[in-house]
Every structure is written in structure tokens, then in C-alpha cells.
Image (spheres, rainbow, N blue to C red):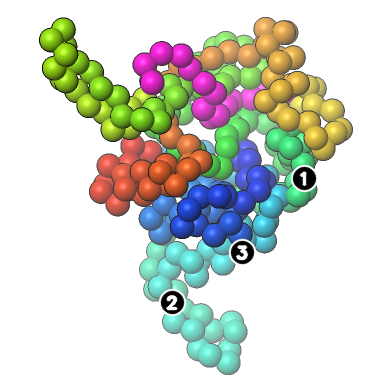
Amino acid sequence: MKVVILCGGFGTRIRDVSDNVPKPMIPIGRYPIVWHIMKYYASFGFKEFILCLGYKSHVIKDFFLNYEAHTKDFTIQLGRKDDVQFHTDHDESDWRVTLADTGLDALTGARIRKIRNYIGDDEHFMLTYGDGVGDIDIESLLAFHKKSGKILTVTGVRPPGRFGELIADSDDIVTEFNEKPQATKGRISGGFFVCHRDIFNYFDERDNLMFEQEPMNRLVADRQMCLYKHDGFWQPMDTSREYQLLNSLYEKGNAPWVR
């Protein structure tokens, strides 16, 4: 089963990160966030990826075209372009990555429609965004989707808190402080979708079609979208604070998305 990752959005405004960097290429540790997402899916055995590219697509293409050089030690004989000796290994040699240029200005619905041919004859495929990580149980998510019989399953997550959460007892004595909590009420879409191939019937030919609007609303009206509840870790990278948080978790060895 293939994993489609939306990587076509415009550059980031995150402080300390160049605005020329496509958002999926913002690093957590040594590697871009899209690599972390792919690594997570691969840990469940899903190693066929389709990346929907747009803004600065050449940056993402360069990373994967030169993946060995980006991830291994090597010796090169200058003057002999083909004389490169790699010294170390990585665990991604069985990944298959399709890099699909889906247009600079296309919105999410159009990007998904444009990669239909790469899905092949698969009945289902995974879909997510290239700028958020979590510890979703992918096997459980897939089983839930197949059991539901619906066209689309969306992972509903608790939105991460923007401010510290204070919990006090009846005497107003603080008993708990969470610097970056998950909200305890309500859910939002965290991505990490599973789609039946019939979802392509909900897309038209417009480049300005946003998946999260008309197609999803039609799926709701047709009772073809179900909710997989996830109460664990989920975190997008939209702000400098979130960028620093994810890097801090990774550097301290406390990253929930690393398996």
C-alpha cells in the first residue's frame, strides 16, 4: 500500500529557518520532517511513497536524488565523477519514492487527483501532510478503515495546547503543570488519512480544489467519512516554538514518533 504525502505548500515563516526551504524540508535533527514521517510509516512496513511536490520541488528532488551522499560517509576521487566509495549503510534501501511535480499553485485536492496514476490498482492508500508527526498506530488505523467500509478515514487528534496548562486542587494549589499539553476536549483533523480509491470520484479538474473543503464536505454528506480517534502524541510544525519543541524532543531522545 502506498503512502501519499502532500509536500507542495509554500515556504515557511518559521524564525531561524530560511523562507526558501519547502516546509517538508525543515529539519528535525539532521533530517527533514518529511523524512521522519516516512521513517514512521516505514516502521509499520509501508515503504512505497508518493510525494506531491510544488514549491521549491527541486530541493526535495535533490535530497532524494542524492540520498546516499546526504546520509552516508563517502570518499570521492576528484576529477572522476563516477568514482565514489560509500562507507556506511542506512535502513532505507528498500524504500520506493515517487516524486510527482503536482504544480506550483495547485491546492491539496488537485495534488491528490494528479497522482492517481501512481496509485495503480491498489484499493486503498495512505495520505498525510508533510509537516506533522505523531505516534498514531498505523496498523490499527488501517484495520479501523477497512472495517468501516467507508471511502475516507481521518485521524482525529487533540489539538496541542498553545500555552501552559495549570491544574489545581480545591484549595487552588497547583498540582500539575504541562508546558505543552494536548487539549482534553474536542478533536481536529490530524491528517494520517486512509483512502479508498473511490475518493478520486470526489475530485474535479480544478487546480484550486482544496481537499479539506468540497471533497470532504461531500464525503460527510454521503456518510462516507469516519473518524479514527487518537489520544496520543500529535504535533504539526507551524511556528518557531513548535520547530524548537520537536527538535528538543528529538535531541533529548524523547521523540514519540521515533520507533
- Report the span colored magenta: 183-199
| x and y percentages locating residue 146 in the rendered image | 57, 17
Rate crowding at label 3 as few (under 14), some (14 to 19) or many (20 or more) other CA atoms within 10 Å.
few
Q: Quadrant of residue 168?
A: top left
Q: CA distance from mark 3 to mark 2?
A: 18 Å
The answer, for residue 119, to whether it is visible in the render is: yes
Q: Which residue is mark 3?
A: 62
Q: Which residue is mark 2?
A: 74
Q: Which residue is mark 1?
A: 105
Q: Amino acid at mark 2?
A: Phe
Q: Looking at the rendered structure, which numbered label has been put on residue 11?
A: none
The residue sitting at 57% across, 37% down in the picture is 129
The residue sitting at 30% across, 52% down in the picture is 251
Q: Amino acid at mark 1?
A: Asp
Q: Is residue 208 left or right of residue 177?
A: right
Q: CA distance from mark 1 to mark 2?
A: 38 Å
Q: Amino acid at mark 3?
A: Asp
For the C terminus, give its image quadrant.
top left
Rate crowding at label 1 as few (under 14), some (14 to 19) or many (20 or more) other CA atoms within 10 Å.
some
